Image (spheres, rainbow, N blue to C red):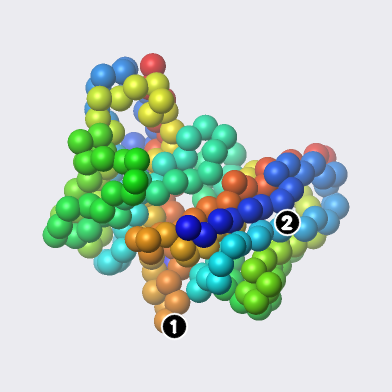
Amino acid sequence: SAVISQKPSRDICQRGTSLTIQCQVDSQVTMMFWYRQQPGQSLTLIATANQGSEATYESGFVIDKFPISRPNLTFSTLTVSNMSPEDSSIYLCSVVVWASGSGEQFFGPGTRLTVL
Amino acid sequence: GIQVEQSPPDLILQEGANSTLRCNFSDSVNNLQWFHQNPWGQLINLFYIPSGTKQNGRLSATTVATERYSLLYISSSQTTDSGVYFCAVLGGSQGNLIFGKGTKLSVKP
């Protein structure tokens, strides 16, 4: 498995501001993802955080709104820019851990964001 | 893309009861995982089960890949089992998981 931490765990922000969420993993991982979970909904992929190159965004998510950094194989940040109340969600990072030829995904504890 | 459907959407149980949660998926998959999301929002890995049967304490899971479904069994339910159970399959274009909408379980004392 993997031990994943996220900062902050929760925040309340004003509309128009930006928040940067950090994700730290206790081991080097190749594949790291950022997901969003809107209230009462399931999880949706925002993007893959690529080490050494630009993130790969899912349809409906753009770099200007959700810039992502991946400076090394254990760390990534997701910024939610120019926030509106519709951005109120739980944001989770996820990594793939490989063992015996199988890749299992593990999730961080999430960042619960409320935008007023 | 691949579709993942879970049933039932909501389930209310009395403590001690057993339950079965179902996950149907629309295409063959190499990875299927079950998660429990607790009331604080944390996703806890329950099973990595692309095929076959696994058991962990009061929980067990079976995936019949050829028929494209998976079942999660909870026996002797406890109030701490409450939360949302998600089934997810590897099917995204980026190697990501595609999640079902979840089953919300409430276990009453």
Label of residue B59 in the image: none
In this figure, which residue is indicated by the disc labeled 2? B21
Residue A105 located left or right of residue B56 = left
Residue drawn 44% across the image and 83% down it: A100
Image coordinates of residue A55 in percent, x first then y, are: 22, 52
Q: Please tell me whether residue A25 is drawn above or below residue A45 in the rendered image.
A: below
Q: CA distance from mark 1 to mark 2?
A: 28 Å
Q: Residue at x 42, y 42 (%)?
A: A36
Residue at 39% x, 21% y is A85
Give residue A73's quadrant in the image. bottom left
Disc ID at residue A100: 1
> Label 2 lies in what chain?
B
Where is residue A93 drawn, in percent x and y? 37, 50
**Location of residue A27 (image quadrant):** bottom left
Query: Residue B7, image x and y in percent?
Result: 71, 51
Q: Residue furthest bottom?
A: A100
Q: Where, quadrant-wise, is the C terminus of chain A in this rendering?
A: top left
Report x, y in % for residue A90. Answer: 44, 37
Task: Determine if residue B54 is in view.
Answer: no
Relative horizontal placement of residue A54, taking residue A107 as reference (left or right): left
- Between A37 and A12, the residue placed more toward the observer is A37
Name above or below for residue B29 compared with residue A22.
below
Mark 2: secondary structure: strand
Circle 1 chain: A
Mark 1 and 2 residues: CB-CB less than 8 Å, in contact? no
Nearer the observer: mark 1 or 2; the answer is 2
Which image quarter: residue B107?
Answer: top right
A7 left or right of B55?
A: left
For numbered disc 1, what is the local secondary structure?
A: loop
Q: Residues within 10 Å of mark 2 (few under 14, many from 20)?
A: many
- Screen quadrant of the N terminus of chain A: bottom left
For image coordinates 25% across by 25% down, the residue present is: A82
